[in-house]
Amino acid sequence: MTVKEQMALNYYENYAPEIKTIILNAFIAGYSQGLKKTREITVDHVNFYDLGLPSGTLWSEPIREKHSNTYITYELSSYSDVCDLPIPTLEDLKELIHNCRIDCNGANIAKDVVVIGPSGRRIEVGTEDYLNNPSNPNSVKCRRKGEGVNECENMFWIKSDVVDNCATVAVVNFNEKSLSSSKQFTGYKLPYILVKRS
């Protein structure tokens, strides 16, 4: 063993716990960066995120209006406008509810409900409309809430049969930190989310 190797071994023996912690933290940081790069797929300008669901289904966040730049404004559509798109099924929603943790971003003026998957990846659904600058009457209004939706809630369409002019929706509730299903009039304009099958 050379002198340098002996010195390195002595150093390691004296500081082994600290060195292991540094190496572990570096590995975790690198692994996390690798996951972030592999968990997002863009198709036709829509970002799909791998939440780590058992089915491998990828979810988008609510689709934003194309002309919206820095302000997040959702594209709101009636059920007939989106029923032929790859929107989630009730089974997809149940898988999301069963496997993900629901949290809220209370510091955000838009009151986002955050769905955190087993992979640590998250998607957000805003539950409030807001003006960028409420004191300015010409301020940009950011539309995130669908029509006919209760305060601190939002909904997005679920692929389903239409019965009595109603279709299934996912109900996102900020106060209860919950995600559930309900029925809503198909003519109301609501946000929509897309899924991608693996």
Image (cartoon, rainbow, N blue to C red):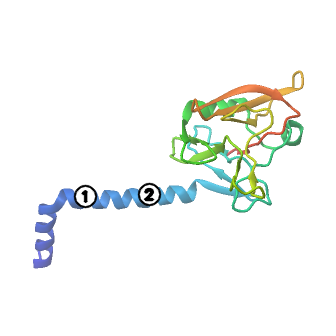
Residue 10: % across, % down: 10, 67
Checking the image for residue 189, the label placed there is: none
Please count the marks in the image.
2
> Does 15 sit above or below residue 105?
below
Work out whether residue 161 can be spotted. Answer: no
Work out whether residue 123 can be spotted. Answer: yes
Residue 156: % across, % down: 74, 37
Q: Residue beneath label 2, please?
A: 31
Quadrant where the N terminus sits is: bottom left
Residue 51: % across, % down: 58, 44
The quarter of the picture where residue 181 lies is top right
> Secondary structure under badge 1?
helix
With 70 as the anchor, is 164 left or right in this view? Answer: right
Residue 176: % across, % down: 58, 29
At 67% across and 40% down in the image, what residue appears? 127
How busy is the neighbourhood of tag 2: few (under 14 within 10 Å), some, or many (20 plus)?
Answer: few
> Secondary structure under badge 2?
helix
Looking at this view, name the residue that lies furthest to the top.
164
At 15% across and 74% down in the image, what residue appears? 5
At 58% across and 32% down in the image, what residue appears? 175
Mark-to-mark CA distance, 2 and 1: 16 Å
> Does 130 sit above or below residue 14?
above
Q: Earlier in the sequence, mark 2 or mark 1?
A: 1
Checking the image for residue 20, the label placed there is: 1
**Given the image, on which type of amino acid does mark 2 rest?**
Tyr
With 183 as the anchor, is 127 left or right in this view? Answer: left
Q: Nearer the viewer, residue 181 or 150?
A: 150
At 74% across and 41% down in the image, what residue appears? 145
How busy is the neighbourhood of tag 1: few (under 14 within 10 Å), some, or many (20 plus)?
Answer: few
User: Is there CB contact under 8 Å for labels 2 and 1?
Assistant: no
Q: Nearer the viewer, residue 36 or 146?
A: 146
